[in-house]
Amino acid sequence: MKQVTRKQSLTSSMGMVTSNHPLASSVGLSILAAGGNAFDAAAGTAFALSVVEPMMVGPFGGGFTNFYIPDKGFFTIDGYVSAPGKASETMYNPIEVDNSPSGMFEVEGKLNQNGYLAVGTPGNLQVWTHLVEKYGKFPLKDVIFPAIQIARNGFQVSDYLSNNIRDNSTELLKHSESSDIYLPNKIVPQKGQIIRNPNFALVLEGISRYGSSYLYDGELGQHVEDEMKKNDGLISLDDLKKQRFFYRDSVSGTYKDYEINSVGPVSSGGICLIQMLNILENFDLEQYSITDSKRIHILSEVFKIVFADRYEYIGDPEYVQIPLDGLISKKYALERSKEINLDRAQSYEFTHKFKLNDSENTTHFNVTDSEGNIVSMTQTINNAFGSKVALKDTGMLLNNCMELFDPNPGMANSIQPFKRCLSSMTPTIITKKSKPYLVLGTPGGRKIFGAVAQALLALINNDLSLQASVEAPRIWTDGGVLELEYEFDSDIKKSLEFLGHEVTSVNRVAGGLNAIMFENDLMVGSACHRADGSPAGLSGGYAMPSKPGDAFRDY
């Protein structure tokens, strides 16, 4: 049966890039075509995304990287944002946190969301340059060059970017560098208009010459400190010098015949994904279509259980003792599965909930090459356009990752100097019989691992194509309202309400999921309709070698 999708997948033989912007995917592909490997291409894609998807990602943000090298195995890097050294658990005045209509941490003046006091110490740039310097084939300057050209010459605005600028225009207008770039003449640019960022091109040139030290121990870092002092921010050059990324142990599990390899804490994503799949193994999901209310009910109950455990057990491993082996064990999953009533929605309690916050404004991309390397990266500056501050004379947007901390003192996720907040990022690589099968991930805050699980279930249990799987309608709940994307009809909603769920329809759950599947020595790339995602693939190859004296013949 033909599966109708909004976008189309792409098949290639020598390399694939899937990202949430076609220009960024094409940059990664051009690096592969020029002889670079997946690490060069991943870094090039990241730098390009910081130009063309600026509301989601940039060097002054944080994220997680999951990668595979044949004969060496799986590796994960934690490059998340940390609190500045001068940060404290009483630096904000929280207001009506539990009743926040947005579900976010609210403080007086929204100082943890907008402006310089919302900015945490970034980890992205360190990781991007490290991937090239340690694992890549190209010099850093060649990897960054395409992003420099795009920033200087400009790119066309999409509806997606235009809408994001419109939604954040009030705060962007408060900062001259931000408004000059994204709201010229104080007008929201429309689809097809050109955005240029020449100051950011100069910053990228500085990075191409001096590497990450340009920010963490150099001229750009000193400029950050100077501007922070002028605008009541906290980050110092010393904070930047102390910032580190960490190699973390991968979190691994299985679902049916598939091996799951994902990232561990400080991200909760890998643990929650594996726990969710472990519980779902105890139900016969193959008998249900994706839109069957019984399937949705089972998924929603599993989501609730996983979130109850997430709130209870998972945090920064430097501050919280995490029972990882127990959470991802099959035995524990079986015990939790028995708590689910197939005829009634329930609550699943935990003893001490700590406040959590995750932004949906993130990006994800995957890269594979002809050598068998796989790189999967989820990256963010937190909210759309981060703190809304583009640093003076740099065009570089600053994150607002301080919003990810609980502004209340004495909680597991409260602010402490140099501490990292909990994330839900889930860049995941899946193998079958020890061979690569799938790499995928998505933006979406706390909805990330649920969205990744649903795409995987659609592919494995419902036998959908990769494109149909990443586009398949999603649900989400963390124990409160059950969100259904608009494709689910009113009869499904009524059936779920009859089971005791409080249901609401939403435009989308999580963001632009993209994936690469390995099939018959080929790579299939897909990106869903929830962002400007696009796959870019490399096939063909060089001319066949010939012996001296051979001549071309006509056949």
Image (spheres, helix red, strand yellow):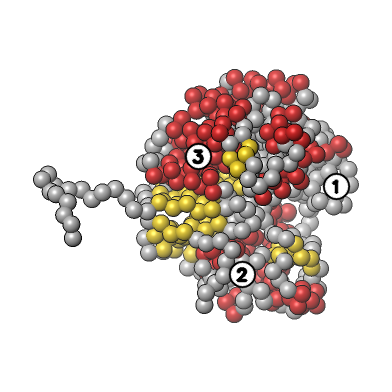
Q: CA distance from mark 1 to mark 3?
A: 38 Å
Q: CA distance from mark 2 to mark 3?
A: 35 Å
Foreground tag (1 vs 3): 3
In the rendered image, which quarter is residue 153 located in?
top right
Residue 295 in picture, x, y percent from top left: 66, 74
Q: Which element type, helix, strand or loop, lies under badge 1?
A: loop
Residue at the spot x=57%, y=53% of the render?
A: 533
Side (left or right) of 536 relative to 198? left
Question: What amino acid is labelled 1 in the image?
Answer: Val
Type of amino acid under label 3:
Ala
Q: Which mark is residue 43?
A: 3
Q: Position of residue 547 (x, y in %)?
A: 13, 47
Q: Which mark is residue 97?
A: 1
Q: Position of residue 83 (x, y in %)?
A: 70, 34
Residue of label 2: 280
Left or right relative to 458: residue 143 = left
Q: Nearer the viewer, residue 328 or 196?
A: 196
Task: Please indicate whether residue 431 sits to the left or right of residue 229 in the image.
Answer: left
* Image coords of residue 346 (percent x, y): 78, 70
Quarter of the image for the C terminus: give it.
bottom left
Query: Which badge, 1 or 3, is on the more N-terminal residue?
Result: 3
Label 2–label 3 contact, CB within 8 A: no
Mark nearer the N terminus (2 vs 3):
3
